[in-house]
Amino acid sequence: MANGLNVCGNVVGLPTLDAKTQAVLHEDRAPYQETELSRCGKLYGASEPMRNLFTMISKVAPTNANVLIVGESGTGKELVANVIHQKSKDSSQPFVALNCGAVSPQLIEAELFGHERGSFTGAIRSQKGCFERANGGTLFLDEVTEMSLDMQVKLLRVLETNRFYRIGADEETEVRVRVVAATNRDPAEAVAAGLLRRDLYYRLAVFPIAMPSLRERGHDIGLLADLFLQQLNAEEGCNKFFSRASLRLLQAYPWPGNVRELKNVVHRAFILADRELDIAPAIGPVRNAPTLAEQNTDCVTVQIGSKLADAEQQLICATLDHCGGNKTMTAEVLGVSLKTLYNRLNEYQSKLFLQDAIVHASPYGVQARN
């Protein structure tokens, strides 16, 4: 067993490859074979973005601050919420989760606040809502931007007063609940689009946390794939391993579904494999994003005599557009650091006479995020 340092405070044992498998994979795993996964709750990672995430969790967990987690689907937002609760001083109290996008607008008020018997058709008995069930603990509201604006007003009032009315009730109920919310949308864009009330955004985002996508986590991809494979080997009593081609594809594929997709792909490849895992067939049927190799099929035409700075701008904006606005992937394709890319984009934004050209060249904006 290899020990990984738990940034949240513990040392944990993680499964390692047997000697024979390590010998087979030595050449392709060289960049990350000596790296150890750190663990925080059910979150694993060795990359700098994940270590920063673990630090953020350890800072905010002991407080009472509301948290807004922002990140793509499949990055582990609920796992973060769970760890925050586990590391809080109220960890012995309930943790209640609600996906706001999975509840119809007609039922979400009753789901959040509960109802009295006979308050509407089918209400044969009184029932507590999520706020009451989470009293003293943590309420996790996933995909909060999918909530209607009318409900956002009611949610805001609860966050401000810690009081609400059950449907059909004459008296208010008082609770003490920490709210951790999450969204896969950019909050600023959601506010601008009228999907999220600005005042609710500021109330939720007392402590914002940005989840890194899997493609931003470098060799965490291979480490996590190893972890998932060894867990499956332990469960099934097998000793399967990745092919060398699979290890290369793990790093080349952009993983639009993030850690959730990676885990599912490893599981599918495990089921299909007799001994050596080939992840290409497991990715193929569900792939919905281009590989890095496929991203190089387009070209940019630059007129002879163009200024070098103009040609660079055209290439950067076209590559950003082709990568779907993903700045990390764009930097990788261009062979520059992410900081360099942000500097270039901010330079373009600051030149007012180039704004129109940039907007038409790329729909993804140039606002750098911290």
Image (cartoon, grey):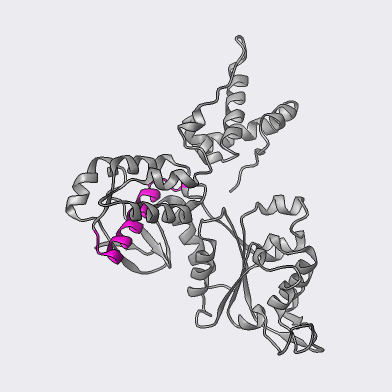
Q: In the rendered view, tell whether residue 345 sits above or below residue 63.
A: above
Q: 141 or 67: nearer the eye?
A: 141
* x and y percentages locating residue 328 in the rendered image: 52, 40
Answer left or right for 1 relative to 110: left
Which residue does the image show at 69% across and 30% down from the upper left? Answer: 358
Quadrant position of residue 280 = top left
Q: In the rendered view, tell whether residue 65 sits above or below residue 288.
A: below
Q: 281 or 327: nearer the eye?
A: 281
Which residue does the image show at 73% across and 73% down from the upper left? Answer: 107
Per the rendered image, the range of residues in magenta is 215-238
Q: In the rendered view, tell whether residue 81 sits above or below residue 227.
A: below
Quadrant position of residue 139 = bottom right
Which residue does the image show at 21% across and 50% down from the upper left? Answer: 21
Residue 236 highlighted magenta (yes or no)? yes
Residue at far top of view: 305
Q: How many marks?
A: 0
Can residue 250 be seen in this snapshot?
no
Answer left or right for 319 relative to 225: right
* x and y percentages locating residue 108 in the rendered image: 71, 72
Image quadrant in which the N terminus is located: bottom left
Can residue 53 be seen in this snapshot?
yes
Q: In the rendered view, tell whether residue 118 sits above or below residue 314.
A: below
Q: 68 or 60: nearer the eye?
A: 68
Residue at far right of view: 170
* x and y percentages locating residue 282 in the rendered image: 41, 48
Which residue does the image show at 79% across and 87% down from the upper left? Answer: 169
Answer left or right for 123 relative to 292: right
* x and y percentages locating residue 326 in the rendered image: 56, 41
Answer left or right for 194 relative to 68: right
Q: Main secondary structure of the magenta part?
A: helix
